[in-house]
Image (tube, coloured by chain):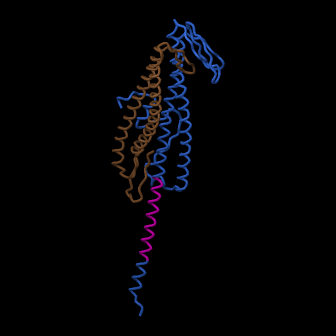
Amino acid sequence: MSEVETNEYSVLFEADIKPTSNIPGVTFISNVEEYLKDKEIESVFRQLQDSYSKFKYFESKLSNNISILTLRSKQLQESLDIVDHVASKTEENFQVQYELSEGVYSSAQVDHPKSIYLWLGANVMLEYSFEEAKQVLRKNKDSVDKQLKDTIQDLGYVKDQITTTDVNVSRVYNYDVLQKRKLKQQQLQGQSNISTTTTTTSTSTPPK
Amino acid sequence: MSKVLIDKNDEVDLEVTSQDQKMINLFGRLNNRKHELLKMKAYKQEALEKSGDARDEIFLADDDAKFNYTMGQAFLETDKVESETLVERFIEKLETEIKQIDSEVSAINSKHQELKVLLYAKFKNSINLEE
């Protein structure tokens, strides 16, 4: 793993992943027989199914957040790149086609740019020096990346819970099948025992 | 997705320990990531191909040709030299990203191999660890 650059996803290589927020976990069933003692098998299945759908819901929510955060991080990087580009042109004039409205472009002449404007949201736009603008954007990007990293970790944790539930279901199911088969065999054996006894008794007392 | 499925004829009652469960989880988690990475790689490779075509086009254009280079939502009017530099830089960026994806995928593959050895040794045919 040493040759791999660490990124937001490196946490997925950990043997045991922990959630960053309050996400409940499933308990691993260490001993199926013990676990099923005094329990109705149907209710156990239902309970496992419930937790499975709950984690599936978490999973889709977190995946969605990851797409949103990844996109936002990419957009902030683009903004940083463009600020860099404009900052390198303070001694020049250049043309730019900018979007006036969805799909509508107009041309603008930028003459010796000295500063840049950032849209801060809430209908506020502020003028910044190039350095300050980059600082603001960098700070926003760092915070988005941190959120992204945490969400990836949480999703990894949720995926583990799903896998654990999957395995729990299979194990309970297999245990149930084996139990039923054993029971059937015992019954069969029981029946054949009875039939042998009847035959022996009948042969031991032959009719006169 | 890895699943423990005990074959009907496989009567061996295997005990799954929480250590095994952790390995299975890790396997599944990395498998998901691997598929994401491969998808992303295909996407980047396509972008790389297109940028290569763009570079060729710029190379063939007249020396005084003007280009519109997209940056974010705007188009910057650039001359030949500048467009070349920008495209080159973009291509380099894509190439590094693809290399990073490759090394992450190979790290996953070797981890998978390691886990397969351990898990197959214990569970034999009762476990399916293929994609």
Residue A81 or residue A174, whichever sits in front: A81
Chain A colour as displayed: blue
Residue A148 locus on image (x, y percent): 51, 29
Which of the image's four quarters has the N terminus of chain A?
A: top left
Q: Is residue A187 magenta?
A: yes
* Above or below for B20 versus B6: above
Residue B19 shown left or right of residue A62 in the figure:
left
Check the rendered structure and report the hue given to chain B.
Answer: brown
In percent of the image, x 52 and y 55: which residue is there? Answer: A39
How many numbered marks does the figure carry? 0
Residue A143: image x %, image y %?
52, 23
Give the residues in magenta: A171-194
- Asked if residue A11 is among those painted magenta in the image, a careful observer would answer no
Quick check: A50 above or below A3?
below
Quarter of the figure with residue A124: top right
**Quadrant where the C terminus of chain A is found in the figure:** bottom left
